[in-house]
Image: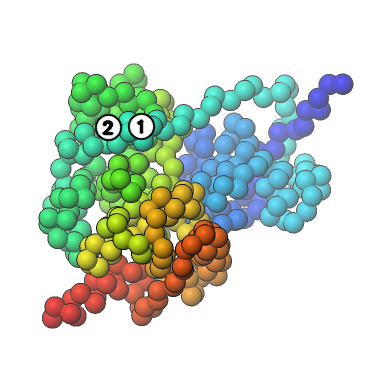
Amino acid sequence: MAAKIYDKIPIVDTARRCGLVLDSRTLRRKEVEASCPFCGDHGPGKYHLSLNTDTDQYRCNLCGAHGNSVSLYARIKGICNKEAYLELAHESKVYPLPQPPSPQTQERQPCSLEQRHAVYSDMLAHLTLLPKHGENLLERGLSEERIRRNEYRSMPETERGRRLLADLLRSHGHDLHGIPGFRTYYGDWTLSGPNGFLIPVRNKDGLIQGLKIRLDDAQQANRKYRWLSSRNLSSGTRSYSWVHVTGNTQSKRAFLTEGPLKGDVASFLAQDALFICIGGVNALNGLNDTIRSLGVHEVVEAMDMDQFTNPQVRQAIITLRREVQSIPGIRYYQCTWNPRFKGVDDYLLDWTKRKTA
């Protein structure tokens, strides 16, 4: 019996019908970015849901929710797939499929940690930190020595500079295939990404897993950071939300927070306390393994204080607690502070200033 071929229901049209917020800057791309309705980290300016216009599939890069146009509509509306299809086919713009879709090219995955660390370390060694970015880091409470040690660097601001950097790395014997952030453009390798400064995201052994960018042009307050990635670009590679480890890795107590820069600052202000930093409140992949590998006995939650005013964030943190508390032998505590300071880094900076005043 021949397989039944269903009509093609555009994923972007479906997302609009569901009321999802779309990133207008990506509407002409193969992958359109949208807010995710299934995880707590969504809303204006947060576009973690990828909508593939070729396959009409969706996937959230934080919570992992995935499916197609019909299942997206069904899940949001609380109905079965058959009912969802009938509603979409009746009221939406539906395009007939003349033939089964051709197999999709597999998305390029990052190369080994050792290779990424080697390329990124060499890359950072040949970049500098612009004065405006150095001032930003000093204002957060870091010392000049700690800024140098953490190897923050500014993204090259010209296309020529980015191509020269890629050429230099290749001349040193590095293969840029599988390195998030690098791509080819008319046959030449270059670095892709917005302007800003780079934040190394390291594992417990200090190896650089990936890089995050603190954007210069952050149009929304909750859209200040982006992973260095070349996903869906020629010869490009996606990034993942890796877990960052900073501070004294011999400590048996670890503080848990969101964001690598926040963790770096908080650790420095707390005399190199051990911090484990997830990429977002829903980005839990790798957290369990990281905690186990460190051999800590206590985990102290130091998540942002907006958990008390944002129901989605609060629900995501409840899920996070359950994940950590499921690890045998772990004692779990919660740390809170004056809510006028959103993050633990803000609170510690104020405490340090008052202490030295």
Counting from the top left corner in percent of width and height, residue 142 is at 19, 61
Give the residue drawn at x 47%, y 59%: 281
Which residue bears the numbered disc 2? 119
The reply to whether residue 261 is visible in this rendering is no
Give the residue drawn at x 37%, y 71%: 342
Residue 234 appears left or right of 191: right
Q: Does residue 356 sit above or below 94 in this rendering?
A: below
Q: How did the renderer colour the structure?
A: rainbow
Which residue bears the numbered disc 1? 179
Residue 65 appears left or right of 339: right
Who comes first in sequence, dot 1 or dot 2?
2
The reply to whether residue 111 is visible in this rendering is yes
Q: Which kind of residue does numbered mark 2 sit on? A: Val
- Between 141 and 247, the residue placed more toward the observer is 247
Question: Distance from label 1 to label 2 (Cα)?
Answer: 8 Å
Residue 47 appears left or right of 252: right
| Residue that extends furthest to the top in the rendered view of this protein | 187
Residue 274 appears left or right of 45: left
Secondary structure of the residue carrying tag 1 is loop
